Amino acid sequence: MHGTRVPEKDIIPTQEELGIGFVPLSPLGNGFLTGKITNSTKFGPGDIRSILTRFTTESVDANQALLDLIGNMAEKKKAIPARTALAWVIAQKPWFVPIPGTRKLYRLEENNGAANIELTEEELTMFNAALARIDVAGSRIYRIRND
């Protein structure tokens, strides 16, 4: 998954050893992991996503496997994809604290429900194995398009 999972290899083991918590930056991928963004989504003026490579038509199409994985787990848990993605982060380690940004109260309420979703060890193992086989297209927020 290119640079999207670098902390898992390089940073998180050190944090665990030192007893330092982990607060993931943009745990919903700037809305990408909500499952509501399609290859035809248009972003308004000033929306940073309009220049991020993760949100190009090609990247959105290429990343459908990731959205399907989250969507399938969400369906199994009778939840929405955003809540399920956050539940996955929470399930990784007890000292992972995702703080998704939002400007809307109803989104905050949706996100808070992630703490009520339990992923079994078997579900987590299966999900992580499937996730490891997915190559996510487009860079995270700190890299923008050059076109």
Image: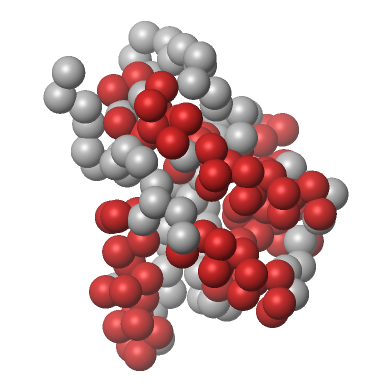
Q: In this view, does 115 lie to the left or right of 52?
A: right
Q: Which residue is drawn at 41% across and 22% down?
A: 57
Q: In this view, does 97 lie above or below 144?
A: below
Q: Is residue 30 left or right of residue 85?
A: left
Q: Which quadrant, please, contains the N terminus?
A: bottom left
x, y percentage for residue 96?
Answer: 51, 69
Q: Residue at x 54, y 76 (%)?
A: 93
x, y percentage for residue 107?
Answer: 66, 35
User: How many numbered discs, if any?
Assistant: 0
Instruction: Report whether residue 101 is seen.
Output: no
Q: Residue at x 51, y 60 (%)?
A: 131
Rendering colour mode: secondary structure
Q: Is residue 131 above or below residue 80?
A: below
For the view shown, which residue lies furthest in the left direction?
146
Q: Residue at x 38, y 26 (%)?
A: 58
Question: Dividing the picture into quarters, in which one does residue 67 lie?
Answer: top right
